[in-house]
Image: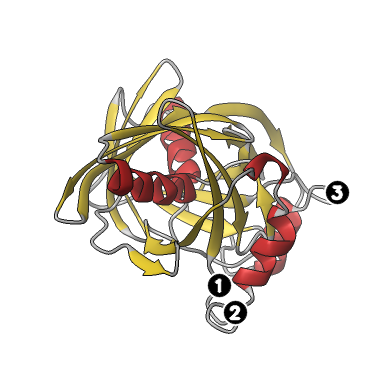
Amino acid sequence: MKFYKYQGTGNDFVMIDNRNTDFPKDNTELIQKLCDRRFGIGGDGLILLENDAHYDFKMLYYNADGNESSMCGNGGRCIVAFAHFLDIFEDKTSFTAIDGLHEAEIKSGIVKLKMIDVDCLKMIDNDFELNTGSPHYVKYVDDVENYDVYHIGNKIRNSDTYKEKGINVNFVTELPENKLFVRTYERGVEDETFSCGTGVTAAALTFMKKKHLSSVPVKVLGGQLKVYAEETEGKFKNIWLEGPAKQVFIGNIEI
């Protein structure tokens, strides 16, 4: 089987062109193996690109545990770069994912992806809960660079409130000039990743609400992202996630 490896700010994915529908997508063990960093290709997830009757293509996303999951923002940016590589579109595209329709554009390796509207930011003490295509918990901390993201993220994700369906947990520190540093513990991966697109979006929206901003630059372990949005009475629309998406390598693997 031919595969492609992509990464968006260090969030990496096994990418499969499945327009011929040959990939056995119900084979959870195979997806786990392909995402395994020792016995497979290695990735935070696996993404299938398929045909869509009304739009340029369809995105199917699977976590490294082999299960189909909710929307992945960096994966969405990477599949846009992949579709561009396959000559499916020139500079602007529209595609479907599990959370609905997305628009995107690519220029010089930078992908700008439109996310779903967000109508609700739920406060939990001083923290936030919201859904940006995937469910997210956002917690502001003083020094995220030296924070115990794995253990505290794991504890929140497996708490009585969230253990059944899981939640992604984002730890955020405000930097000078209205910039954020975000680190994320991801469900399904069950570890910290170098970047989480829907998590960065979630964190940025909470910061926009607090500071009355329309854009926020975000530092992650894997690089730099930027989020744009419009807020009206606590509801957000025209949300865009922007950052690099790169092809790492192409190969073949026996399945």
Instruction: Give the spatial CA distance, label 2 vs label 1.
Output: 5 Å
The front one of 245 and 232 is: 232
Residue 126 sits above or below residue 226 on the image: below
Q: Residue at x 68, y 54 (%)?
A: 149
In the image as oriented, which residue stretches furthest toward the top? 108
Q: Which residue position holds label 3?
A: 38
- SS at mark 1? loop
For label 2, the residue is 163
Callout 3 touching callout 1 (CB < 8 Å):
no
How would you rate the neighbour count of disc 2 (Cα within 10 Å): few for under 14, some for 14-19, many for 20 or more?
some
Type of the residue with mark 3:
Arg
Image quarter hosting the C terminus: bottom right
Q: State how far apart marks 3 and 1 are (Cα).
A: 26 Å
Query: Image point 28% across, 53% down: which residue?
Result: 116
Q: Position of residue 249 (x, y in %)?
A: 67, 28
**Is 132 placed left or right of 141 in the picture?**
left
